[in-house]
Structures are given as C-alpha cells and as structure tokens.
Amino acid sequence: MVPETGTARTGKKVTDLVIAQGPEKLVVTCDAGEDDWRRNACEGLAAGLRERMPGAEVRIAGDDTNVSAMRVSVEWVRSHETFVMARLSWRQGAQAAAQGPVIEFSVNDRRINASDARPFGRTLADTFPLGG
C-alpha cells in the first residue's frame, strides 16, 4: 500500500510560470503501474484539476498522443512508510516541460494508508500554476 520509492530527474528547476488561461484539454499521467496508492492519487489529481478548471476536459491516460492537450504528469520523488514526495510537470505539445514544487505528505503516528492518496492528489492539483 505504500508508494514505491523513485528518484526525480535532476537538473530542472521549479518554474514560476502561471498559466493565465486554463487549457481546454488536459491529459494526466501518473506512472502508477500496479500501485493502487499512486492510481488513487492520480484520480485525486484529476478530480482536483477538474474542480479548478470546470470547462476543461481532464482525463487520465498513460499513452495518449494528443498533441493539442496539455500533458500533466506526476513525478514521484521519494516515498517511505510514513511519507511521500512528488511534483507535477506539464507541457504543451513539443514545448519543454515545466515543473512545480516538490510536495511532501507525511504522518508521524502511523503509516500512510489508502485514504491518504486522493487528498494528496488534490494537493498536487493545487500546485498547477493556474491564474489570471
């Protein structure tokens, strides 16, 4: 139930880009594999993005090649029994990907459990730089 530990790509910096007008189509990818915790976090992320951009088409797809859609990906930075760290990256078409801040969810008195996944995904959605 604990997300698998991974490493983040280095050499990229957090961007302060704010997307003034929300994209019409978003494709969310999370590299969840067989991990139910990550899959649930991804579903929470998609739900959070739908709430923040009610007019946008937001869907979860691992191998979507729709170049008109903005791709939003979860990069799993690190995890353990009591914490998980991840960040979003996003790109439109062939543009270079931008990255958000690394977000950590941790608990002190228990292990991370299934009910923590969706709220963590929604927290990631809050880091998507939407403004205007």
Image: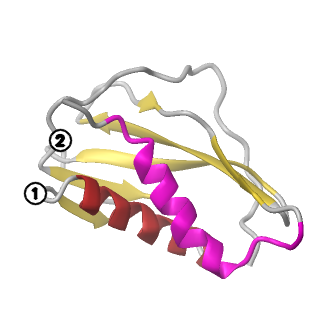
The residue that label 1 is drawn on is 55
Going by the image, does 71 lie left or right of 42? left
In the structure shown, which secondary structural element does the residue marked by tag 1 occupy? Answer: loop
Q: Nearer the viewer, residue 116 or 25?
A: 116
Q: Residue at x 42, y 20 (%)?
A: 16
Q: Nearer the viewer, residue 120 or 32?
A: 120
- Marks 2 and 1, Cα distance to the nearest angstrom? 9 Å
Q: Which portion, as a residue range, is magenta? A: 109-129
Within-10-Å neighbours for mark 1: few <14, some 14–19, many 20+: few
Q: Quadrant of residue 17?
A: top left
Quadrant for the C terminus, please. Answer: top left
Mark 2 and mark 1 residues within 8 Å of each other at the beta carbon: yes
Tell me the SS state at disc 2: loop
- Identify the mark at residue 22; answer none if there is no mark: 2
**Residue at the spot 35% in from the left edge and 34% down from the top edge:** 129
Query: In the figure, is residue 46 to the left or right of 99?
Result: left
